[in-house]
Image (spheres, coloured by chain):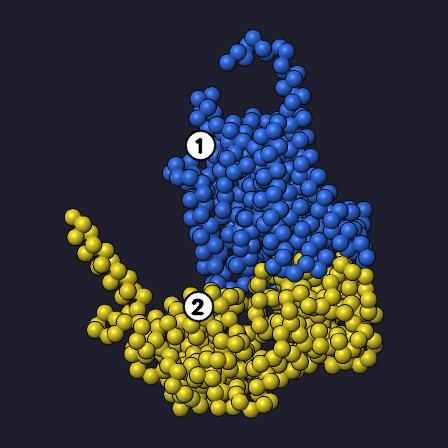
């Protein structure tokens, strides 16, 4: 490479092009979001119910689970991998958290029970469990050298099976007196106190997103993730410990999935459901892809993914407000996924 | 070389056939010929009526269907909601009745009306997008939209809307059957859309409580239908007496088997209150009234679709082939899947 010779002059140019490129990748999905929002606003113009603050608070709540899981998937897809076990991990986490609360709560002293200590412990365990599930995926991918699609197709079945086995194929309910007062507030569309504007769970998603964006953009680990996803062989030659990066990527994404599992648990009024989130991984992958991620790796951004998630939930919510029947909804969402990615390709090809 | 390979392949095929149709290895005829393994036909009792189930009843493949009255359920749910909105007195629990339909009584006009109910079109009714054209706008949320049962509920709801004249019905089911999360999202969207009332068939008696109570807190009354909800704040509960439906099924099975035999219960799904009530009515009655009937399997669940039910039923049918005398399935999709599985395994004949 003639890097040394051109080092001085293109440095500034590269940063500029980087920033513009970033804007470009985010702007596309963002325009899509505005377009879809405008379309639904027009379709519901007579009632105006779609553009109310309350409805957007509802959409925020409905985006949280997919959004949290999609943050993890973004990192995985930037690294050029995929995770099909997301939905199963979420189901496993809801089941384990519900079972833990059920066991733990009666054993605790009364004061701690009313504060919901059992819930907090169980939810902490849930996040760690998600991380473990991810780490196992990562170790299998790195250790067995089997393509991620197949490894996680396997763990997709294994984690789902574990969830069903632990729960004896039934739904695990948390007793009503073990549900602390704060639990239902986390994902309530109208938060208390009011100045929060959106549900605490949605804030958690935003904070997590900012943190992840900083890690991906400014940390060495973040650069390694992009390097591995862009060209694994080159990354290895440059001295990147590729297996270690992969395991870390999956473990990190697993923590996000674990958090998504906890949020799903809360969303279902503290229910552990071994059949929940079936097919959620496809929704998550779709959101990342709409947001500029690529199945071949090296591309994708946190902001893009969040917009992709918003597009998905605005579609779900808007179709209800516009009274579009279910079969039509399926078709519309399918068309938009393909259209979004095609536009992205055309744009890249032209640039 | 190739000969040996072909032989190996044939062996593999034979082993597979043994796995799928146990009994065909010991000289018995293959699966294509009618009931051979069990010698006598299995007595199948189902729940709900769809075209294929009714025609199977007509040909004697099904010996009884417990039939609800979804038309009246859809109609009464909407009527109850409107009565509440207009501040008229209402009952907190409304039963819409259940009937045992058999090959013998299915021609009677009253029964025939129940098994050939009207069905609504996919997109019948009002939508949330337009301005309210009637005094009240009520959103009806079923558990799913693909079962014929829900289409008849829809027709009933539209019938009520037409007859009352002051209410428009918005019909919106979860995008995917059996998904609690999607149904919670629908209730939230209904709140955001500011409807006057929500008529809901809860997929889960517990998981839906919070979103329903959030609606009630926002001044939107909720009527539950078909399946119960663990909340005292709802306006009314309109449903079949599901427990009694299970009792009727157990009695019919006992009568057909002469009080003696081995019985399978293919359950539907966990957390679905209506089918759990039917299953309980069935098992309670077996234990209480038919000591000669032995329940050899009651731990399998059919899952949400005819497809998943058929898979589960196939496994059950092959496992208990020749050892089972009667089967009860607690809803349309499980009955449908079981019927196809029993037909495929040659365990059911159409002799009346």
What's the colour of chain A in the image?
A: blue
* Residue B112, placed above or below residue B225: below
Which chain is the one coloured yellow? B
Q: Residue at x 70, y 74 (%)?
A: B157
Mark 2, secondary structure of its residue: helix
Q: Residue at x 69, y 41 (%)?
A: A32
Q: Badge 1: few (under 14), some or many (20 or more) residues near its Cα, within 10 Å?
A: some
B317 displayed left or right of B287: left
Q: How many numbered discs?
A: 2
Taking depth in this image into account, of B124 and A319 the one nearest to the observer is: B124
Residue A26 on image: x %, y %? 67, 34
In space, the residues marked 1 and 2 are separated at their CA atoms by 43 Å
* Residue B3, placed above or below residue A203: below
User: Chain ID for label 2?
Assistant: B
On the image, numbered disc 2 is attached to which residue?
B310
Marks 1, 2 in one chain: no
Taking depth in this image into account, of A133 and A312 the one nearest to the observer is: A312
Residue B279 on image: x %, y %? 51, 77
Residue B144 on image: x %, y %? 60, 66
Q: Residue at x 55, y 41 (%)?
A: A73
Mark 1, secondary structure of its residue: helix
């Amino acid at each position: 490479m003639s890097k040394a010779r051109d080092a001085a002059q293109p440095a500034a140019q590269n940063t500029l092009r980087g920033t513009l490129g970033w804007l470009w990748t985010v702007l596309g999905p963002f325009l899509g979001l505005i377009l879809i929002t405008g379309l639904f606003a027009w379709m519901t113009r007579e009632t105006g119910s779609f553009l109310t603050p309350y409805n957007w608070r509802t959409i925020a709540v409905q985006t949280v689970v997919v959004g949290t899981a999609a943050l993890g998937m973004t990192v995985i897809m930037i690294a050029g991998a995929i995770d099909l076990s997301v939905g199963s991990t979420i189901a496993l986490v809801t089941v384990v958290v519900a079972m833990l609360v059920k066991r733990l709560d009666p054993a605790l002293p009364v004061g701690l029970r009313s504060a919901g200590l059992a819930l907090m412990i169980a939810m902490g365990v849930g996040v760690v469990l998600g991380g473990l599930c991810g780490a196992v995926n990562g170790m299998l991918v790195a250790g067995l050298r089997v393509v991620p699609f197949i490894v996680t197709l396997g763990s997709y079945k294994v984690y789902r099976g574990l969830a069903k086995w632990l729960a004896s194929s039934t739904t695990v309910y948390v007793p009503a007196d073990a549900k602390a007062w704060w639990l239902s507030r986390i994902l309530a569309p109208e938060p208390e106190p009011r100045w929060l504007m959106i549900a605490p769970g949605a804030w958690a998603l935003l904070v997590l997103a900012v943190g992840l964006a900083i890690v991906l953009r400014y940390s060495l680990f973040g650069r390694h993730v992009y390097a591995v996803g862009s060209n694994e062989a080159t990354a290895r030659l440059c001295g990147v410990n590729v297996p270690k990066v992969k395991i870390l990527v999956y473990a990190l994404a697993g923590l996000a999935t674990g958090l998504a599992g906890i949020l799903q648990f809360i969303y279902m009024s503290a229910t552990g459901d071994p059949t929940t989130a079936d097919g959620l991984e496809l929704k998550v992958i779709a959101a990342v892809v709409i947001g500029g991620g690529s199945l071949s790796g090296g591309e994708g951004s946190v902001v893009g993914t969040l917009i992709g998630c918003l597009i998905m939930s605005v579609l779900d919510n808007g179709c209800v407000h516009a009274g579009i029947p279910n079969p039509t909804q399926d078709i519309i969402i399918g068309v938009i996924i393909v259209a979004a990615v095609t536009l992205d390709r055309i744009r890249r090809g032209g640039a | 070389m190739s000969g040996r390979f072909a032989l190996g392949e044939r062996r593999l095929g034979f082993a597979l056939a043994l796995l799928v149709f146990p009994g065909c290895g010991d000289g018995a005829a293959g699966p294509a010929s009618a009931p051979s393994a069990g010698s006598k036909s299995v007595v199948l009792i189902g729940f709900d009526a769809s075209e294929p189930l009714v025609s199977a009843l007509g040909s004697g493949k099904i010996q009884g269907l417990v039939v609800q009255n979804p038309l009246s359920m859809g109609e009464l749910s909407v009527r109850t909601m409107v009565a509440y909105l207009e501040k008229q007195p209402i009952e907190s629990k409304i039963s819409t009745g259940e009937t045992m339909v058999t090959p013998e009584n299915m021609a009677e006009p009253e029964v025939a009306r129940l098994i050939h109910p009207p069905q609504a079109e996919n997109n019948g009714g009002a939508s949330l997008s337009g301005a309210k054209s009637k005094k009240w706008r009520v959103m009806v949320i079923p558990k799913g939209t693909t079962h014929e049962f829900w289409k008849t509920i829809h027709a009933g709801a539209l019938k009520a809307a037409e007859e009352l004249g002051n209410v428009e019905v918005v019909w919106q089911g979860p995008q995917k059957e059996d998904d609690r999360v999607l149904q919670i999202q629908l209730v939230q969207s209904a709140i955001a859309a500011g409807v006057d009332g929500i008529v809901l068939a809860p997929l889960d008696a517990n998981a839906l409580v919070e979103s329903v109570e959030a609606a009630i807190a926002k001044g939107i009354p909720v009527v539950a239908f078909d399946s119960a909800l663990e909340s005292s704040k709802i306006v009314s509960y309109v449903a079949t007496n599901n427990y009694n439906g299970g009792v009727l099924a157990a009695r019919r099975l006992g009568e057909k088997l002469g009080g003696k035999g081995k019985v399978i219960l293919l359950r539907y799904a966990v957390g679905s209150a209506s089918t759990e009530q039917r299953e309980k009515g069935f098992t309670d009655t077996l234990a209480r009234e038919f000591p000669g009937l032995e329940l050899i399997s009651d731990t399998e669940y059919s899952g949400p679709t005819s497809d998943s039910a058929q898979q589960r039923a196939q496994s059950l049918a092959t496992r208990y082939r020749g050892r089972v005398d009667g089967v009860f399935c607690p809803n349309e999709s499980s009955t449908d899947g079981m019927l196809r599985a029993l037909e495929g395994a040659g365990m059911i004949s159409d002799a009346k």
